[in-house]
Amino acid sequence: MVTKAHPPVLRELVRRLSKLPGIGEKSATRLAMFFLKAPEEVVEGLVENLVRLKRDIRTCPVCFHFTDGALCSICADPSRKTGEICVVETSADLLAIEESGAFKGRYHVLQGALAPLDGIGPDDLRIPELLSRLEQEDVREVILATNPTGEGEATAHYLAKLLEKSPVRVTRIASGIPMGGDVKYADKVTLERALQGRRSVL
Amino acid sequence: MTVVESEAVVLCACDYGESDRIVTFFSLEWGLVRAMAKGARRSRKRFVHAFEPNSVVQLGLGRRRTLSWVESCRLVEGHLALRTDPLRWAYAGLLLETTLRLNPENMPSPPFYTLLRGALERLGTDRDPANVAALFLVRALRILGTLPSLERCVQCGATIEEASFWKLSLETGRFSCGAHGAAAEEGIALDKGSAALFQSMLRAPVEKIWRFRLRKGVAADVIHAVCTWVEHHTAQRLKSRRLLDRMANGSEGGTRFPRSSALIPSP
């Protein structure tokens, strides 16, 4: 508990830190005490990093992933020009796929999904930009990697309908039992999808 | 602590803290209920795929005084067909949002639950989602007791058979024949057939109303009028309505509510 015994600067820092996600007052106090004891260069480095984060990070004008340059590292890399575009909801999804190393093409971040209860429609997503990319770039496949939630599915179906008549191949990421998962804990929709999407092992 | 069970429709869910979610259900036993799902974002096994809006679930709720938390939640029906058509998805959003706005918490209403469940089921399969939405909205107002009687003209007492044109005003709560309501600008204009159809639909059991077919313009007028009324009385914009309107504005002809094809922008 922060009391009047704490100097005002420390009190203010604790108050600000406790606004961060997942940080309560106790954790905030612990962090503040760490900064107090830490060498000056550690604190200065962190401050400089935060300032640069706000000043330099913007979205890539091509794929709408975060970048600090004119283009993001993926769009700027010529070896990623494989003719495949993986469409994801958020940059966090992009990072997860990148971490897996399973995809070597380029991405397109929609920055959301269709959500009627939040009033988010097709105009709020980066769909026109995706369509213009398909016209300008040499694309042969669009992989719809939106989440297998109601909103993600609705968005994927909307895009699939939109690209129905375009010459590109439109595919959807598979869904089913996750690796390391347990069949008995899977819900009926997941099991149904997993069985529908089964494939020969020989 | 007591754990009680009921079937419920998931209306919406939002994240809370690091790993929890607050989920709003419309349940058969308790009506609208909000409950905390502890660890819902962390556990892969406990509430898997159970908090998707439009889903029907078997809900186990722990309750103590005014607090409710989700003990168990098993998916019964996912209504996957709604996800395959953005227009149906948007109409489903409208149904959920009006349910959320019109019902007070912890007020059981089995007829409303039957209506909502039936509407979501029908919305996934019916060829005209606007018709399903319009029937749902009118019947919902009747269940909530806010729809005026559609038996006679409120002023002269004429029956449906005695007049060719009718006006239903939700704002003033008036249902009047052409002679006594024609001057009123607001309200839904109905011909004799549509008024009779409304009357029959309101008399029919909730689970059997989906066979009624409103004329195209009437369904759109009903949705518009009910949404306006809901927004006026709750002092809150319906976000799903805004989405439907925006879809319509992008379409040719500028109809108030869109057709499926209207969702695909012209090249």
Image (tube, coloured by chain):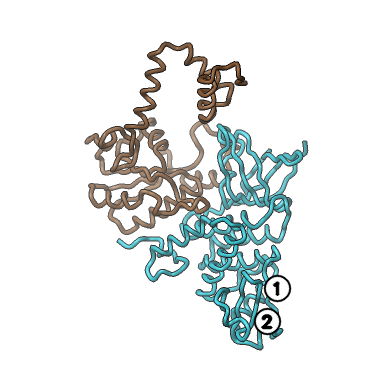
Q: How many marks?
A: 2
Near-viewer residue (B214 or A141): B214
User: What is the letter of the cyan chain?
Assistant: B
Q: Residue B153, labelled with which disc? A: 2
Residue on which the image places disc 1: B203
Q: Position of residue B29 (x, y in %)?
A: 73, 51
Near-viewer residue (A61 or A113): A61
What residue lies at 64% left-to-right and 39% top-to-bottom?
Answer: B36
Q: Are marks 1 and 2 on the same chain?
A: yes
Task: State left or right for residue A124 relative to residue A28.
Answer: left
Inter-mark Cα distance, 1 to 2: 17 Å
Q: What chain does mark 2 sit on?
A: B
Badge 1 amino acid: Arg
What residue lies at 35% left-to-right and 61% top-to-bottom?
Answer: B265
Badge 2 amino acid: Cys
Q: How would you rate the neighbour count of disc 2 (Cα within 10 Å): few for under 14, some for 14-19, many for 20 or more?
A: many
